[in-house]
Image: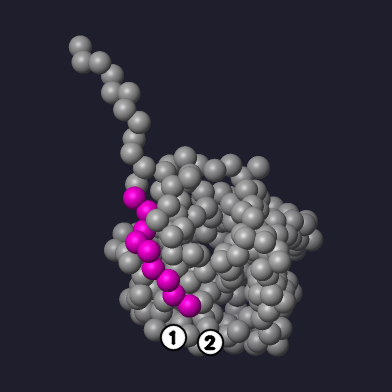
Amino acid sequence: MPAPDTTEPALSQGFPRQQQEPPGSTHEMTPRPDHGEDTYEGHDRLSGKRALVTGGDSGIGRAVAIAFAREGADVAFTYQPEENDDARETARWIEDAGRTALAIEADLRDPATCERVVHETVSQLGGLDVLVNNAGFQYARGDSIADMSDEQIDRVLATNLKAMFVLTREALEHLRASRGNVINVSSIQAYEPSTSLLDYASTKAAINNFTVNFAQEAGPHGVRVNAVAPGPIWTPLQPATQPPEKLEQFGQDTPLGRAGQPAECAPAFVFLASDQTASYVSGTVLGVTGGKGVF
């Protein structure tokens, strides 16, 4: 009988050194992320639903938009002016699934713009069933709070937190009418914060608190509120905000030994968005972290 193989599995290689300017572009990444374009198969779990996904042009947002469309939902999503090429590609994938795509250029740091995004979505899609607060910003090119400019702090807090509050506030009456749900995007950084991501990690911890807290208010109105906490995921945000040398080890500190792909996050959002699978799930944070704990 052969002896058991006790060799430790080799960790996967990281990513080539590369750098972009924020917010980053999918087309310039090596390798290109997997958003489920060729693999995600829908099962009508969101048939007839109307969803708004902020930051849906690339990364996790694009993977969610594709999955939602293939599950039967019409999808509105926001993007920044610099992300126009990525936005067009996301819209094409939604339309290829036979669903309506509504791409909305928006700087979500502006409260009036957040209000416009919700109103435009409801007007064009006829209502709102699922709000995914995905848009976020980080900047990991410093090692101390002394390196954080006022502009950086304002951008992170406004994008990650203030926009979530305003969008959710504006969407609430529509979600009550449809007995819909909210899915926020947290992060493993809420549980294992990196020194270089002090501001970003703080917002993600606050998102967890918001999720659990707001679920108590929204529940009596039939609105479910949950969050997904991704681990290290290969998106344009990484080469746009991380030092190039860190990408070579990106994700290798997880128990699974690698970074995740956006496509590996999308099923968690479908699960939480669907009344078929998560009708009694609210106030929870679902980790997609490569094995790191979210507790």
The crowding category of the residue bearing disc 2, from other C-alpha atoms within 10 Å (few below 14, some 14 to 19, many at least 20), is some
Front one among 100 and 256: 256
Report the span colored magenta.
13-21
Predominant secondary structure in magenta?
Answer: loop
The secondary element bearing badge 1 is classed as helix
Residue 7 on image: x %, y %: 31, 28
Residue at x 35%, y 75% (from the top left corner):
28
The secondary element bearing badge 2 is classed as strand
Question: Number of labelled discs?
Answer: 2
In the image, is residue 12 part of the stretch drawn in magenta? no
Residue ID for mark 2? 105
Residue 24 on image: x %, y %: 46, 75
Residue at x 64%, y 63% (from the top left corner):
200
Residue at x 41%, y 48% (from the top left corner):
258
Q: Amino acid at mark 1?
A: Asn
Examine the image and state in which quarter residue 63 appears: bottom left
Do the residues bearing badges 2 and 1 touch, measured as CB atoms within 8 Å?
yes
Residue 214 on image: x %, y %: 75, 61
Examine the image and state in which quarter residue 149 appears: bottom right
Residue ID for mark 1? 84
